[in-house]
Image (cartoon, helix red, strand yellow):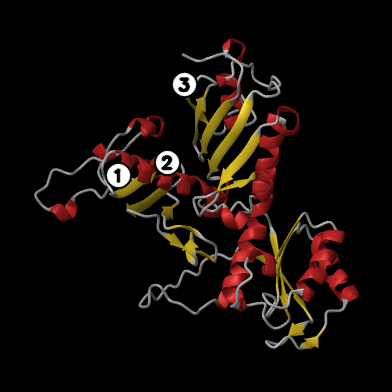
């Protein structure tokens, strides 16, 4: 039974939310400790945001109605907003600002060839679409060989801003240890109106230009999308008036406050929550070794648990390298509808009408004794 806020005793609700690309799942705990689940489409013309709409419904409020002050204690959310934006390449148009002579360093990367015998090399798409080289250089021992000229920097960044760039990733040589030049250029970019400025000494203050640079670009590429979503949720919940505390799951499996939630920490926000739930569910059922397979509507996540959480600090997701603590999860851009739609139809009797595509529950198998001729799944 759904409990109306007007019927509830004095106290506040807690909400746990999994905001996926297709569905949003919400569990609310009322002041009496009872649990109330709800599932909504993540995108619908009927409401602005599925998570907030579910909260309103569980509180017994009309769509768009203001949330009473003190009605919500805490909202803890895992979201695939950043994951899906990365998989589908829907992030912010990003400008790479780097030391002159290193414009191709991130594209060259580590010169790794995952398929060493492939003749048709498919290079991963870069997240940045423009590059500005700055005449600056700090040596490894901190010696300033070439300080940046503020006016030249301002001119170059102003031209990029006029071209429509609103996110900048600043990556200079040895800035992990000597960040003064990045700070100077970052201030100029903000003064010019760049909404998102990610500096490598903040995003990933570690040695190695490529890993630090990749992480900074990811942060600049995804943080604006996250900021818009977090801002929307915070405004809809009117957190300053209601006192609701909003926290987001990070890729590492920990929680952070909404104002600290950044793109580089959000790649596996939703999937990380799934790994934690998988592990806790398995342990409670008496299993300390668990394999998790989570096929959503947009992406599929696979992970395993062997008595402790496994984390990686330098990994690759959707062809993008990054260096940030995150759960070891393999994610592919193939959800349920994608998988169904990709099933081959090699015989006339296997043709599926488009209108009936969502009614398919399994792939048809040819009547043959040869396993090699079985329709692949």
Q: Which percent across, then down, holds residue 162?
A: 83, 60
Residue underneath mark 3: 34
Q: Secondary structure at mark 2?
A: loop
Q: Secondary structure at mark 1?
A: loop
Residue 77 relative to residue 236: left or right? left
Q: Which percent across, then down, holds residue 17?
A: 52, 35
The residue lying at 32 percent from left, 45 percent from top is: 343
Q: Secondary structure at mark 3?
A: loop
Q: Is residue 341 visible?
A: no
Residue underneath mark 2: 296
In the image, residue 199 sits, relative to residue 268, either above or below, namely below
Q: CA distance from mark 2 to mark 3?
A: 27 Å
Contact flag, marks 1 and 3 (Cβ < 8 Å): no
Contact flag, marks 2 and 3 (Cβ < 8 Å): no
Q: Which percent across, then down, holds residue 237?
A: 68, 30
Q: Is residue 102 visible?
A: yes
Q: In the rendered structure, which disc, 1 or 2, sits on the residue that comes first in sequence?
A: 2
Marks 1, 2: nearer the viewer:
2
Residue underneath mark 1: 345
Q: In the rendered structure, which disc, 1 or 3, sits on the residue that comes first in sequence?
A: 3
Examine the image and state in which quarter residue 160 appears. Answer: bottom right
Residue 291 relative to residue 87: left or right? left
Crowding near pointer 2: few (<14 within 10 Å), some, many (20+)? some
Marks 1, 3: nearer the viewer:
3
Crowding near pointer 3: few (<14 within 10 Å), some, many (20+)? few
Q: Which percent across, then down, holds residue 206?
A: 60, 73
The residue lying at 54 percent from left, 76 percent from top is: 109
Q: CA distance from mark 1 to mark 3?
A: 48 Å
Crowding near pointer 1: few (<14 within 10 Å), some, many (20+)? few
């Amino acid at each position: 039974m759904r409990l109306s806020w007007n019927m509830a005793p004095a106290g506040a609700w807690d909400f746990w939310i999994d905001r996926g690309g297709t569905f949003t799942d919400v569990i609310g705990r009322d002041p009496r400790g009872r649990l109330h689940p709800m599932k909504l489409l993540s995108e619908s013309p009927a409401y602005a945001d599925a998570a907030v709409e579910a909260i309103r419904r569980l509180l017994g409020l009309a769509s768009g109605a203001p949330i009473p002050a003190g009605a919500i204690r805490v909202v803890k959310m895992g979201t695939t907003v950043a994951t899906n934006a990365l998989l589908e390449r829907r992030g912010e148009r990003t400008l790479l600002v780097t030391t002159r002579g290193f414009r191709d360093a991130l594209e060259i990367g580590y010169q790794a060839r995952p398929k060493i015998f492939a003749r048709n090399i498919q290079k991963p798409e870069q997240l940045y679409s423009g590059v500005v080289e700055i005449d600056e250089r700090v040596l490894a021992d901190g010696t300033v060989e070439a300080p940046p000229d503020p006016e030249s920097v301002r001119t170059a960044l102003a031209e990029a801003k006029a071209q429509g760039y609103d996110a900048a990733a600043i990556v200079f040589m040895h800035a992990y240890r000597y960040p003064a030049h990045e700070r100077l250029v970052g201030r100029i970019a903000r003064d010019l109106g760049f909404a998102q400025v990610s500096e490598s000494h903040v995003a990933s203050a570690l040695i190695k230009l490529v890993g630090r640079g990749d992480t900074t670009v990811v942060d600049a590429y995804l943080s604006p999308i996250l900021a818009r979503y977090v801002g929307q949720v915070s405004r809809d919940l009117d957190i300053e008036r209601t006192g609701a505390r909003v926290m987001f799951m990070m890729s590492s499996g920990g929680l952070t406050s909404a104002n600290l939630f950044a793109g580089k920490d959000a790649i596996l926000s939703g999937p990380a929550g799934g790994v934690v739930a998988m592990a806790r569910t398995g342990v409670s059922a008496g299993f300390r070794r668990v394999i998790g397979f989570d096929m959503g509507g947009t992406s599929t996540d696979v992970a395993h648990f062997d008595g402790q959480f496994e984390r990686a600090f330098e990994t690759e997701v959707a062809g993008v390298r990054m260096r940030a603590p995150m759960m070891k999860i393999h994610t592919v851009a193939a959800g349920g509808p994608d998988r169904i739609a990709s099933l081959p139809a090699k015989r006339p009797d296997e043709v599926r009408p488009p209108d009936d595509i969502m009614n398919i529950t399994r792939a048809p198998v040819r009547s043959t004794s040869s396993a090699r001729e079985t329709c692949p799944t």
